[in-house]
Image (cartoon, rainbow, N blue to C red):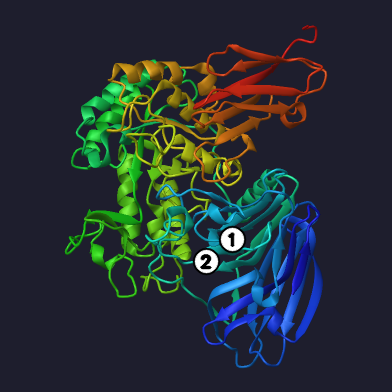
Amino acid sequence: MVNWRFNNGVLLNNTVGYLTDMKAGFVSTADFKNHAINFTAVHDSLGKGIKLTLIHSDNKHLFLLKQLITIYKDRACILVSMTAESSVAPAYPLETRDISPLAVLPKYKGLVFIPGKEPRLLDVPFDNDDWVNVVERTWEKSAAPTNSGISYEFAGLYDKISNSGIVIGSVKHNFWKTGISYRIGHHTGCLDSLKIFGGASTPDNAALPADYGGLDGTHDLVQHGTMIGNQVSSPLIYLSCLPHLQDAFVGYGEINARINGSRTWNKDAPVYWNSFGVEGVLGSEGIMMPPAVKQISDFLHSLKNFSANSKPVLSIDSYDQKIYSTDVLKDISTYAAGNGQQMGFYFIPFAMWSWKDDIKGRKVPGSDYLLEDVLLRDNNDKPIMYKDGKWGAYAMDPTHPAIRQYIIQQLEKAKAINAKFIKIDFLTAGALETSRRYDPKIRTGIQAYNYGMKLLRFLTDSIMGKDIFITQAISPMFPSQYAHARFISTDVYSHLRNDQQGFPHWGSTEASLATGSHMGWVQGTIWPFTNLDVSIMKKFQRNPVLSEQEIKVRIYAMAVMGSIYGDGSDYRDSLAASRAEKFMNNRRLMSLFSHPKAFIPQRAADGATLDQQLSFYLPGDTVKAAIFNFDLKERFSTGFTRQTLGLKPNESFEIRDILSGTLVGVLKRNENIIHLTLSPADALMVNIIPLPINHD
């Protein structure tokens, strides 16, 4: 067993590594008789350091376990993995779907301790579907339905007051879905079970709340595929304990990008208009058909500050190809080009929407393969519906050659309309486990998803060129290296809170920013930008009309998340048009979205309440701060110190509202704290500007 001690007080006691072999069953490092340790120097792409190899062996077992612990000189993290190797001749064939390099188990009197008066466990869903939230678990028994759960790919354990703790996460995403299974102990700040394992596969469970096992898992109907061979290996795990959790998360993002790669974008960030907020799915609302898109184009052309940094994109979302044929989209593209704009393209590479049980004889578009031969299968060999219902989505096998032909067909359509922006959606379908696959060498959902996404990226680069911006909508968090942006949460409809009368109980600004307040570190590390979906200037589809204040809060939320800017409004409506003029033609506001940067959270979301009061700041040449008050009754007052903001001592600063430019206050040279106060249901964003030296 291994004990871990970190200088911020985090303890992991009596940890083991383990393997669940299909024949031998559960075997941990503590079950072996002999334990040896080797030290070797490391000099790799991450830097210089030392690798500790802990070898667990004996004559009783047919294999040995090796724990690998790498400590880098100039990185505030440790990387941990484990391999199981046959130790007999002829070689013992290993097979597993459950392997952990680090586990804290009651059997071995294991314990995790997080110091502080208000400890939290950050529990993260597998993907961004179904409006499932990031959860901040507490040690209060009433805080959640159970005291156990699974976070996917990464998790945080920290003290709310000091914001110090440990970040745990996988940094290779080519085979395993990594689960971080935990059980909260009886004593505050203690876990008596923590398993970081490869092989997570969890079905949706309607009997449980969405955030606590109902919809936050991998959505699988089939257990995780197995790794086989004379040697098998666990996920590679990152551990980092720092005084500020944000720094540990940034390090996690940087290590992921260094190991797996990431896409870059050296131009100004795209801005776009998206049709979904008006038309609905497949244009079924009948509100805006192709000719009206030209009116949208004309209006956007009149917003000079919206168009100041990059050519706006017209993105027709989830469209009916009988209405928006390639010829129709070509016509819109030509018209948009005259207004200095470009086209976007939408498609779903790994799922096919259809009426349920109406797939007989249907072919995958662009191929001669029958759709039913391309679908993933459950344990009864029935096609897996990624979205079940009379009108639903069937999950397709990314390794099947029909998918290559389908992607080529879609990209050739995109090229025909000169699209420079692609939105890909419902990607989780391609990561589902299945009972059989076209390519039997690909054994897991994530392995297949990597195959499909790598293919998509290659075909996009070769067919359309390397200057195409790709944004992911519904998708797993990892692997992340194939796109330039990803939705932080599911679709956002711009209403303030999920409990607003007349609105859906999902998709609010509060819900998206509460999740986002823990996720801003992804911008600039694993993706150039995030995507917080679009703003809405009047109403989303048939939802009620929004207030102007709600729209301001929504846009500020997009800004603090480092999001590209999109809008989904019908500007033929005079109210929507006037509001677009106010917000989308505001020079100070739109300048935030030319090179979006995620703000650093000073006060992130905590707990399940909708009354979140959040604060953020962004260092730089012109320091920025933002506060959000989602409480409908109480005011919110908070302060930012000079040290936090990186402001020079003995200098004066003026604080100006970013939207109106009006003076909010002054920080005098002998003062240390900027105080900001906010009314209920509102947001404030300010620029903090140095005053001349001789200013009194």
Instruction: Give the labeled residue for mark 1.
Output: 172
What is the distance, in whole Å, between disc 1 and disc 2 at their CAs?
A: 8 Å
Residue type at the position of mark 1:
Lys
Is the N terminus in the top left, top right, bottom left or bottom right quadrant? bottom right
Q: Which mark is residue 175?
A: 2
| Residue 403 shown left or right of residue 638 in the figure | left
**Along the viewing direction, whichever of 472 and 513 lies nearer the viewer:** 513
Q: Nearer the viewer, residue 58 or 544?
A: 544
* Above-or-below relation of 666 to 347: above
Q: Are marks 1 and 2 in contact (CB under 8 Å)?
A: yes
Residue at 57 percent across and 57 percent down: it is 141
Question: Is residue 54 left or right of 664 when viewed as pictured?
Answer: right
In the displayed structure, does residue 340 sit left or right of residue 626? left
Determine the secondary structure under disc 2.
Answer: loop
The quadrant the C terminus occupies is: top right
* Crowd rating for badge 2 (residues with CA inside 10 Å; few <14, some 14–19, many 20+): many
Q: Nearer the viewer, residue 160 or 228?
A: 160
Residue 462 visible in the current orientation: yes
Residue depicted at 70% across the width and 43% down the height: 161
Image coordinates of residue 50 in percent, x first then y, are: 80, 63
